[in-house]
Image (cartoon, rainbow, N blue to C red):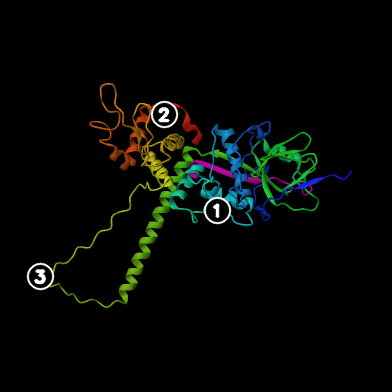
Amino acid sequence: MKEEIKIIPTAQGYIPDEPDERDNIFGAGQTPDEEILPSGNWREVTTLNEHQSINGFETWGCVTFTILNGIEKLAKVIFGIEWNLAERFIYIASDTKQPGNSPKTVATAVREKGLVDEFVLPFNETILTYEQFNSPKPLTKALLDLGEQWKNEYEFRYDFLPRTGNVVSRETLRRAMKTGPCGIAVYAWVLDNDGKYIRPEGLADTHFTLAENVKENGEIECKDSYPPYEKTLSADFPIYTAMRFYLRKKTEAEKQVNRQRLTTFQAIISLISQTVSLISLQVANLFKEPAKPTPPPLDEVVPIKDIEPAPPKYLWSTPAEARRSARVIMDEHGLSWSQKDLLCACIQQESKFNPKAVSPLNKNGTRDWGLAQFNDGKNAQGVPYWIGSGAAFKDTDEVLNNPEKNVRIMIEQYKRGNLNYWASYSTGAYKQWL
């Protein structure tokens, strides 16, 4: 009886990389390969399922979704935290567009631009068109600065798995997956009558997906960016391209070196800019006729030119700007990356980084105000907790119009061990944003 197959149409978002002798190869010692998951079974490490094609349009972003799925699994195993990273950020940073992108291009963008949280640039039911998904393009400075913060804290690397007889063997894939999850290129998708996905003979790769586990019988379990999210490839499905992902936290010494390099680079750019301006001015003066002084009449008042105010140090107009400004203030107070993540998760839960946020009426008749949601209640003696005469804020207007003060007071209370004043922390609700 002839085997029945079912072809499941999906978009093609994978573009193969051109081989380069400079590529890092798994097992060659170029990228660390210590075992972090002895079972090699990343299906046991659960993370969110995310669909690359929702709301009626296609993103062609399988490479981005797969690489970020792999990084989220690494963070859960290595650091014990659940990340939900923004696909839109690295999609735009890597200039992905129809018909897709290559794994090396997207992985390099992660290395160069860093990553940001999903809530900063979400892909949800509010993103109704491809144009919305692929914006802002170019990325704003505030978003790029957030990515830079991640990059200064973490190192992401990748390497390609070597081939044996023109294919990546199951044994090589098993060994690699003990050290990190692997993205694999596949032909998508053809389903046989046993419920396994197969590659019809002669058909090239069209899609990038995450290999989660190689079963003893050679079948490969995958986490995909199209439903059903859990797929199983047949034991004879040949794999021609596989990329392993690696993640680690940078040491304090490395972070200090990065900061020094950045400071030196900024100083050089400033010096070059000043030198160019000076040379331009001198050249212009060579060809400029000297002006004859014409003093104004005695009864004429010479107007004083307006002095342009310096740009504000902190910006609060959007959630992304507010989050960046909050982290800058936290830097000024000497908080570490993980401490900043904690406080930002609390603020996200409290106000979604909206400085003008006002809560619904609480059960006791009070409300919570501003970026850090300070309560307007009083104690049994009638003394205000946060807002009112003698309190941190004189009135609710000050809370809503001074987000900087919101952040600084929250940091102060955190350092005193009083973060449980905020329900987002005391209930554990903040954890969903880490």
Residue 427 is situated, as x and y percent measured from the top left of the image, at 45, 27
In screen coordinates, is 186 left or right of 140? right
| Mark 2 secondary-structure assignment | helix
Nearer the observer: mark 2 or 3; the answer is 2
Dot 1 crowding, Cα within 10 Å, few <14, some 14–19, many 20+: some
Magenta stretch: includes residue 160? yes
Q: Name the residue under label 3.
A: 299
Q: Name the residue under label 1.
A: 129
Residue 300 in sight in this render: yes
Nearer the observer: mark 3 or 1; the answer is 1
Q: Name the residue under label 2.
A: 423
Specify the farthest residue to the left: 299
Residues rendered magenta in the picture? 151-166
For image coordinates 64% across by 46% down, the residue present is 159
Residue 92 is situated, as x and y percent measured from the top left of the image, at 54, 53
Marks 3/1 in contact by CB < 8 Å: the verdict is no
Q: Depth check: 408 or 279 in front?
A: 408
Q: Earlier in the sequence, mark 3 or mark 1?
A: 1
Dot 2 crowding, Cα within 10 Å, few <14, some 14–19, many 20+: some
Whole-angstrom CA distance, mark 3 to mark 1, is: 63 Å
Residue 222 is situated, as x and y percent measured from the top left of the image, at 69, 40
In screen coordinates, is 430 left or right of 184? left
Magenta stretch: includes residue 382? no
Residue 113 is situated, as x and y percent measured from the top left of the image, at 51, 49
In the rendered view, would you say 399 is above or below 88? above
For image coordinates 74% across by 53% down, the residue present is 204
Disc 1 marks a residue whose amino acid type is: Thr
Whole-angstrom CA distance, mark 2 to mark 3, is: 67 Å
